[in-house]
Amino acid sequence: MAAKKKPATFEQALEELEELVERLEAGDLPLEEALADFERGVKLTRECQQKLASAEQKVKVLMEESGSIRELPFDEDTGEEEET
């Protein structure tokens, strides 16, 4: 399988990752192709994590610049912020 070029956006990387997961879950790929898809999936996961971390840092900087910095814990189960 030829190496695919790096997606330009978070959304494109996430979409490609979802497609790879579907292919792998189907379970009908030859071993070599499944391994290549898995490897690509790991790279995409790292890309997405880096892009999210970068976006989070930008938000923090913007909030600090506006003088209204206040971090709230994030409830991962519901996707909502919790008031403390």
Image: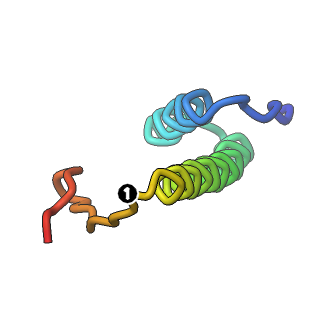
Place residue 49 in its image quadrant: bottom right
Q: Is residue 48 left or right of residue 18?
A: right
**Which residue: 82% across, 31% down?**
5
Residue displayed at 70% across by 45% down? 40
Q: Position of residue 68 (x, y in %)?
A: 37, 57
Mark 1 falls on what kind of element?
loop
At x 71% / y 40%, what residue is drawn?
A: 33
Q: Residue at x 23, y 50 (%)?
A: 79
Q: Is residue 10 left or right of residue 83?
A: right
User: In the rendered view, how is the structure colored?
Assistant: rainbow
Point out residue 46 in the picture as x, y percentages from the top left corner. 64, 56
Q: Nearer the viewer, residue 69 or 29?
A: 69
Residue picked out by circle 1: 68
Q: Can you see residue 29?
A: yes
Question: Considering the image in quadrants, where does the N terminus appear?
Answer: top right
User: Is 18 in front, or is 64?
Assistant: 64
Vertical placement of 53 versus 5: above or below? below
Residue neighbourhood size for the residue with mark 1, other residues' Cα within 10 Å, grouped as few (<14), some (14–19), many (≥20): few
Above or below 63: residue 3: above
Query: Furthest-bottom residue in view?
Result: 84
Q: Position of residue 9 (x, y in %)?
A: 65, 30
Measured as percent of width and height from the top left, residue 8 is found at 72, 29
Amino acid type at circle 1 is Ser
The answer, for residue 52, to whether it is visible in the render is no
- Counting labels gives 1
Judging depth in this view, the residue of 27 and 64 nearest the camera is 64
Choose between 32 and 19: the one closer to the eye. Answer: 19
The C terminus lies in which quarter of the figure?
Answer: bottom left
Q: Is 82 situated left or right of 39 in this image? A: left
Considering every residue shown, the one lying at the far right of the view is 2
Residue 84, compared with residue 76, is above or below; it is below
